[in-house]
Image: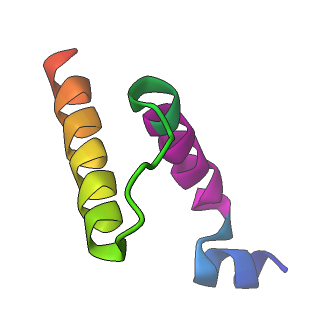
Amino acid sequence: MAAWEARYERSLRWMIEYVFSAVKRTLDGGMRSRRRDLMFSKVENKFWTWNEMQCADL
Protein backbone atom coordinates (compact mmCIF):
# COMPACT_ATOMS: atom_id res chain seq x y z
CA MET A 1 0.00 0.00 0.00
CA ALA A 2 2.81 2.46 0.83
CA ALA A 3 4.38 1.93 -2.61
CA TRP A 4 1.07 2.72 -4.29
CA GLU A 5 0.63 5.87 -2.19
CA ALA A 6 4.15 7.01 -3.00
CA ARG A 7 3.72 6.32 -6.71
CA TYR A 8 0.46 8.25 -7.04
CA GLU A 9 1.23 10.86 -4.36
CA ARG A 10 -1.96 10.00 -2.52
CA SER A 11 -0.77 11.83 0.56
CA LEU A 12 -0.79 15.17 -1.30
CA ARG A 13 -4.56 15.23 -1.69
CA TRP A 14 -5.01 17.12 1.58
CA MET A 15 -2.96 20.02 0.17
CA ILE A 16 -5.16 20.29 -2.89
CA GLU A 17 -8.33 20.10 -0.80
CA TYR A 18 -6.94 22.81 1.51
CA VAL A 19 -6.29 25.20 -1.38
CA PHE A 20 -9.70 24.62 -2.99
CA SER A 21 -11.40 25.21 0.35
CA ALA A 22 -9.35 28.34 1.08
CA VAL A 23 -10.10 29.86 -2.33
CA LYS A 24 -13.82 29.18 -1.95
CA ARG A 25 -13.90 30.64 1.59
CA THR A 26 -11.89 33.71 0.69
CA LEU A 27 -13.25 34.60 -2.74
CA ASP A 28 -16.79 33.16 -2.69
CA GLY A 29 -17.32 29.72 -4.15
CA GLY A 30 -20.38 30.69 -6.19
CA MET A 31 -20.54 30.78 -9.96
CA ARG A 32 -23.07 32.89 -11.85
CA SER A 33 -22.08 32.25 -15.43
CA ARG A 34 -23.60 29.37 -17.36
CA ARG A 35 -21.08 29.49 -20.20
CA ARG A 36 -18.33 26.95 -19.68
CA ASP A 37 -15.55 29.17 -21.03
CA LEU A 38 -16.53 32.01 -18.70
CA MET A 39 -16.70 29.61 -15.75
CA PHE A 40 -13.15 28.41 -16.36
CA SER A 41 -11.97 31.98 -16.77
CA LYS A 42 -13.59 33.04 -13.49
CA VAL A 43 -12.11 30.10 -11.58
CA GLU A 44 -8.67 30.75 -13.06
CA ASN A 45 -8.90 34.40 -12.00
CA LYS A 46 -9.90 33.38 -8.48
CA PHE A 47 -6.86 31.14 -8.14
CA TRP A 48 -4.53 33.81 -9.52
CA THR A 49 -6.00 36.34 -7.09
CA TRP A 50 -5.73 33.97 -4.13
CA ASN A 51 -2.12 33.19 -5.04
CA GLU A 52 -1.26 36.89 -5.22
CA MET A 53 -2.91 37.44 -1.84
CA GLN A 54 -0.79 34.65 -0.35
CA CYS A 55 2.40 36.09 -1.81
CA ALA A 56 1.57 39.55 -0.45
CA ASP A 57 1.30 38.15 3.09
CA LEU A 58 4.93 37.06 3.09
In this rendering, position of residue 22 left or right of residue 12: left
The front one of 17 and 29 is 29
* Residue 34 percent location from the top left of the image: 42, 65
- Looking at the image, which residue is at 45% across and 49% down? 31
* Residue 53 percent location from the top left of the image: 22, 25
Classify residue 8 by image quadrant.
bottom right
Residue span colored magenta: 11-23
Q: Quadrant of the N terminus?
A: bottom right
- Looking at the image, which residue is at 35% across and 71% down? 35
The front one of 24 and 35 is 35
> Is 22 contained in the magenta span?
yes
Q: Quadrant of the C terminus?
A: top left
Classify residue 52 by image quadrant.
top left
* Residue 22 percent location from the top left of the image: 49, 33
> Is 39 contained in the magenta span?
no
In this rendering, position of residue 36 left or right of residue 3: left
Residue 49 versus residue 4 in the image, above or below:
above
- Residue furthest out toward the top: 57
Residue 53 versus residue 51 in the image, above or below:
above
